[in-house]
Amino acid sequence: GVIENFPSDFRKGTNFAGKRWSVSDMDLPFVNMRGNIYTDTNATNATSLITSGTDSNLIMSHYEEMGIWVRFYVVYRYNSDLATRVNDIVKVQGLLA
């Protein structure tokens, strides 16, 4: 099965130093799952990455990222009885004299 994974900071809606972790209010289209959302409200200025002039397209007021974190589980029959289970481990017992 597939289980949605919401880490603690996202579930609690942690806010710290202009950064926010949260879970979306509604399901995302086509996947029917809620997403984990990370938002950084600190201004980001990437104009230092270019050498000539200033490009206003490299200045952002905030940054937001959304992701889906899931855990996959495969359920199968398991025999834990050592007497009937096929096992590569060989038990060796020495003779006591």
Image (cartoon, helix red, strand yellow):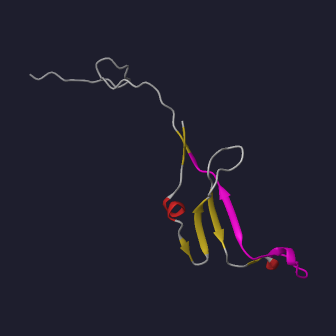
Q: Which residue is drawn at 25% across and 24% down?
A: 92
Residue range of the region highlighted in magenta in the rendering? 49-70
Q: Residue at x 27, y 24 (%)?
A: 91
The quarter of the rendered structure image containing the N terminus is top right
Left/right of residue 22 with respect to residue 88 in the rendered view: right
Left/right of residue 85 with respect to residue 76 in the rendered view: left
Coordinates of residue 29 in the picture (x, y in percent) = 71, 47
Say which of 33 and 1 sits in front: 33
User: Which residue ends up furthest to the bottom in the rendered image?
Assistant: 53
Coordinates of residue 72 in the picture (x, y in percent) = 55, 40
User: Which residue ends up furthest to the top in the rendered image?
Assistant: 84
The quarter of the rendered structure image containing the C terminus is top left
Q: Is residue 67 magenta?
A: yes
Coordinates of residue 35 in the picture (x, y in percent) = 63, 54
Say which of 57 and 46 sits in front: 57
Q: In this view, does 21 lie above or below 55?
A: above
Quadrant position of residue 90: top left
